[in-house]
Amino acid sequence: MHRQMTTLDFLDRGVDIYGDAVGVVAHDGTEYTYAEFGERVDRAAAALSALGIEGGDRVALLAPNTHWFLETLFAINELGAVSVPCNYRLVESDYEYILDDCGAKAVVADYEYAGKVEAVRDAVSAETFVANPAEGVDGDWLDYETLLAGADPDGVERPDISEDDPATINYTSGTTGDPKGVVRTHRTEHYHALITAHHTEITDDDAYLWTLPMFHVNGWGYPYVITGVGGKHVCQRHFDAAGAFERIHDHDVTYLCGAPTVLDSLIDHYRNTDVAATGEKPVRIATAASPPPEATIRTVEDELGWDILHVYGLTETGPLITTSNSPRRIASEGRFAIKTRQGHAMLGTELRVVDQHGEDVPRDDEAMGEIVVRGNQIMDRYWEKPDQTREAFTDRVEGWFHTGDIATIDQRGMISIKDRKKDVIISGGENISSVEVEDALYDHPDIERVAVIGVPHEKWGETPKAIVVPAGGADLTEEGVIEFARDNLAHFKCPTVVELVDDLPETSTGKIRKVELRKSHGDPVE
């Protein structure tokens, strides 16, 4: 038989099977059983319905990692409407663009960020504005908790929802132009949650700490994964290492996610305090965004005693399409040799690395090409951008999504990211992976953060430039960085220019904004 796959399947299972278990812990420690959580979702859906939200309407959601973000995400889909989670780190003009581009009918926002929407309210088409709490916002906003208190949890009858209906529109970071709205259907969200649950081995005994932004491609699908298996959501409005360790102990957290910057923060706090690394249960952590240096993985596993899982993907791909979780290969080849790699394709996912002509590169772990992928978790389309959608699925190979990431692939299909296509440095005809150079520099004890970009060079066309954040108190010099690189890399790969800075611009998920660095640090070198 054929049954429609929707995001609500995960909510229903959590409520039906685990109704008496604690399902959600709010930032302030308030606990909600899955039955209580389900009732709040129903109330939120009824409240939005009373405000005129119906199937197909887009509802923008702007909030940090809160219990009510999770409620509203499910409530929007319960009406057959489309959630549009927004990055809370954007500026007013960004929200004006996104709300206009998706045609949002309503905005539900946290008091901390609603003011950014209020500033452009008259310029957007949205008609309904809800804040939590409304008293914390200047302007005419409806209060979230007041709406829930007055709503009938039995007052909404779910419409017929097709698995091919849009469930959410996630906007890309916009690092190379205007953000694109990635349309993800109920089917793509459902399938992605299933394979993520399998590969991360999450069960009803897990407590998941929300350090990863919930808005980012729907929190990597974990609202559905954790709810569907009956695990416990532990919310933290904004990540800070001290608060993370506090929740690890108070709620016996077993699983969390974090970009390399998050890992570094956790390591620093652990080293500088007497905090215990875990509660009663062991901890595992998934990392993605930019490839973590081997030194970071080694520290997480050897000092904190956590098991680290390296995964990979993009907003357009679910996000997750690969995993390094291969015990057999770890046993035979070594954990650092495997865990620094992005890994194998996940179940039901086809992955290739192709050259500029669309031909597969040799599986020798040396030849570089672009990663292309297809699978049921891949996006449906870019919202109202047919030309960009067509290009994404036809550039080198017809019918495969083109990631823009450059990688090698070994004989057993495990990939290793070398760079973004736009970030590969071509110097004197040689392709240089900025990621490889960065990874080598991270072994320097006095380097805290580093980004490598290509800058114009009169003779070589381009040359590597390292932009370095020194570790606190370090006596680091530009000449010392170059000398260290020459001791650890082929000379043609070494930075010829180094600039020391206080920080690096990042996206919400810890990716360094190299497009900004190229603008501000990309002066030609003679």
Image (cartoon, helix red, strand yellow):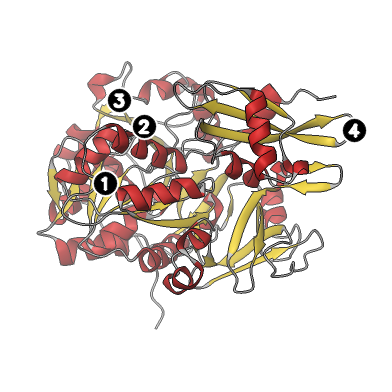
Could you give the CA–CA distance between mark 3 and mark 1, rounded to whole angstroms? Answer: 16 Å
Residue ID for mark 4: 459
Residue 263 position within the rendered picture, expressed as x and y whole percent measured from the top left = 40, 42
Q: Secondary structure at mark 3?
A: loop
Residue ID for mark 3: 111
The answer to the question of whether label 2 and label 4 lie on touching residues, with beta carbons closer than 8 A, is no
The kind of residue on which mark 4 rests is: Lys
The answer to the question of whether label 4 and label 1 lie on touching residues, with beta carbons closer than 8 A, is no
Residue ID for mark 2: 128
Q: Earlier in the sequence, mark 2 or mark 3?
A: 3
Residue ID for mark 1: 71
Q: Secondary structure at mark 4?
A: loop
The kind of residue on which mark 2 rests is: Thr
Q: Residue at x 46, y 43 (%)?
A: 260
Q: Residues within 10 Å of mark 2 (few under 14, many from 20)?
A: some
On the question of residue 340 being in view, the answer is yes
Which is more toward the observer, 153 or 27? Answer: 27
403 shown above or below 93: below
Could you give the CA–CA distance between mark 2 and mark 3, rounded to whole angstroms? Answer: 15 Å
Give left or right: position of 191 versus 237. right
Q: Secondary structure at mark 1?
A: helix
Q: Residue furthest top?
A: 138
Q: Earlier in the sequence, mark 3 or mark 4?
A: 3
On the question of residue 318 being in view, the answer is no
Which is more toward the observer, 54 or 358? Answer: 358
